[in-house]
Image: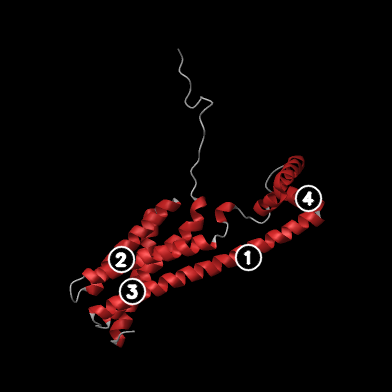
Amino acid sequence: MAESPPHSDDSYIHVEHHYFQRVGWLRAAVLGANDGILSTAGLVIGVASAEASTGAILTAGLAGLVAGAMSMAAGEYVSVSSQADLEKADLDIERAALKSHPEAELEELTDIYMKRGLNPETAREVARQLTEHDALEAHARDELGMSDAVAARPVQAAFSSAASFTIGAVLPILAALIAPAGQITPVVAVISLISLAILGALSARAGGASKLKAASRVVFWGVAAMVVTGVIGHLFGTVV
């Protein structure tokens, strides 16, 4: 008996895995964690280079953690809320246009599909059917470029940024806490750079990008930031 070709069963469902749907939370989370590690490590190294006491170094690190997490949450919420306001305003404009000039909006949608390669008859029919199904959704997606994957979510962005910043900032603080006396700067630097490399690799994996390239990128800027803050702390010789 001849074997059936693979996946000939009608019950087989083709499923594709895409990374773009993660863009909403991934950007905020990666930015928060990277900033948490980098800014806190830089602060700790800068204060340590000024020959401050361990208590002062840890206090500076904790203050940086709290202030940074709140700043990231507020910044993400405000900026993403602004994006949400713009999206709402554009949708209101499009909703009014669909109500006052439906034929012109249909022609506009038809023209969009023709520019994407459909012949005029097919483009007109697609535009008509999509308009009947949900005209505002069709224009939001195909004219304005809006979709659920990139929709503004202020609360999600704020929470992701604050939480990831806190997790990232804890690492250099713990490194400073366990480091032997007089070795805080090298211990914090090494652990922070390792953490940045891991973060870069994990974010690349989540986004389907090159792990080596992403890790190298964050480590390079991590080294630069730590060198600068260390030099400033050493030159001033005082807690800043």
- Label 2, label 3: how many angstroms apart (C-alpha)? 11 Å
Three-letter amino acid code at the position of disc 1:
Asp
Snapshot quadrant of residue 174? bottom left
Q: Which residue is mark 4?
A: 107
Residue 154 visible in the picture:
yes
Question: Horizontally, is 186 left or right of 216 in the view?
Answer: left
Residue at 75 percent across and 41 percent down: it is 125
Q: Is residue 8 above or below residue 18?
A: above
Q: Which residue is mark 1?
A: 85
Comes first in the chain, label 1 or label 3: 3
Quarter placement of the C terminus? bottom left
Q: Position of residue 103 (x, y in %)?
A: 81, 50
- Label 3, label 4: how many angstroms apart (C-alpha)? 59 Å
Quarter placement of the N terminus? top left
**Foreground: disc 1 or disc 4:** 1
Three-letter amino acid code at the position of disc 4:
Glu
Q: Is residue 230 above or below residue 81?
A: below
Residue at 70 percent across and 52 percent down: it is 136
